[in-house]
Amino acid sequence: MASDFILMNQHSAPAGIIVAAMYRFFDFPGYQSFRAPLLDFCVAHKLKGTLLLAPEGINGTVAGRRENIDALKDHLQQDDRFEAMEYKESRAVEMPFQRMKVKLKKEIVTMGLEGVQPGRRSGQRLDPEAWNRVISDPGTLVIDTRNRYEYDIGTFVNAVSPDTVNFREFPEFVKTRLDPARHRKVAMFCTGGIRCEKASAWMLEQGFEEVYQLNGGILRYLEEVKPEQSLWRGECFVFDGRVAVDEKLEQGNYEQCFACRRPLSTEDLQSPYYERGVSCPACHEDITAKQRRRFSERQKQVEIAERRGSRHIGVPQQSIS
């Protein structure tokens, strides 16, 4: 029997929908044969969401009633390969997903490289106290492995951005701007831990000797660290209807562009290039006439649903942390 899951930001179990996010890097030969039984189990237990299976492990988010989420946890723990699963729960008042999907992928977080094995070796994990010490050292290069728009609304002091649009661009940032001989001490972080775990594994393969990662990511850090001790500045982008959370893990001050999914500040919302549900200052020049007509029609339907007191299909359901 595998040991219990590592719990991240777990809350008491109220009535309603539990949203469970999970990942685990491990060698997963024969992962394809695991898909059908896992999908059948989730459907039988009325779970919805998406789980990704790949040679490097599992990643995904599912939602359902408390007893059905617990059943999935128990089911996975019967297999030792899922030992020490990284796991995080939040709550939603309504089901946030339309269906249950289990997908086969080359990677559970897409970096676009073959042979990276974070399940075997990755950066040294640091708890918040140790993390604060390491990133306060002038000799440490602190890297935010997230995308540019995530970095722009909040990050750690002294952190640099790889200035990426997606995670596939991270290796090029390392190859062109970093040097193992010069950057001897590197500390990395991301939202929940999965991106920096894979990035740190790859950097070790590239010859970087002293590589650290923030255990549990930004969200665990914000949960555990008192504001007066925090080295985090700004808000943290999250991949649900809240868009961003503040240092108290409460919903932040950003909205999200429907077209490009970037977070929008109050200033962005006042821009002449912002059109609700259609475009924002970052993407207005990239939207085609066909897309603009389609997005405008969708926005009309959203507003009709709002006036009726309902939610249009496709509008993200906010999670409650």
Image (tube, rainbow, N blue to C red):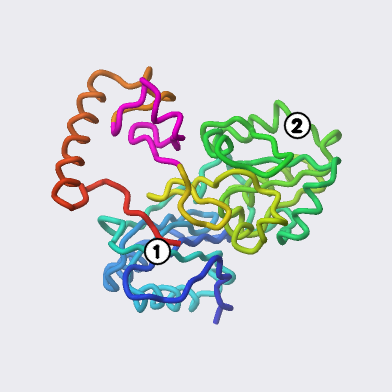
Give left or right: position of 40 versus 201. left
Residue depicted at 38% across the width and 73% down the height: 69
The quadrant of the rendering that contains the N terminus is: bottom right
Q: Amino acid at mark 1?
A: Val
Q: Are marks 2 and 1 in contact (CB under 8 Å)?
A: no
Locate the C terminus by quadrant: bottom left
> Which residue is under mark 2?
178
Apparent side of residue 303 relative to residue 153 in the rendered image (left or right): left
Foreground: 191 or 270?
270
Residue under label 1: 19
Which residue occupies the foreground of this view, 246 or 58?
A: 246
Q: Residue shown at 40%/40% (left/top)?
A: 255
Depicted 295 relative to depicted 304: above or below: above
Q: Amino acid at mark 2?
A: Leu
Residue found farthest to the bottom: 1
Give the image location of residue 298, x and y in percent.
20, 35
- For the stretch drawn in magenta, the main secondary structure is loop
Tell me: 31 left or right of 168: left
- Residue 34 falls in image quadrant: bottom left
Q: Residues within 10 Å of mark 1 (few under 14, many from 20)?
A: many
Horizontal and vertical percent position of residue 266:
44, 34
Residue at image coords 45%, 52%: 251
Q: Report the magenta residues as a range.
A: 254-277
- Examine the structure image and report whether residue 255 is included in the region drawn in magenta: yes
How many marks overall? 2
Q: Position of residue 210 (x, y in %)?
A: 81, 48
Category of crowding for the residue at label 2, using alpha-carbon neighbours closer than 10 angstroms: few (below 14), some (14–19), many (at least 20) = some
In the image shown, does 244 or 126 lie closer to the viewer? 244
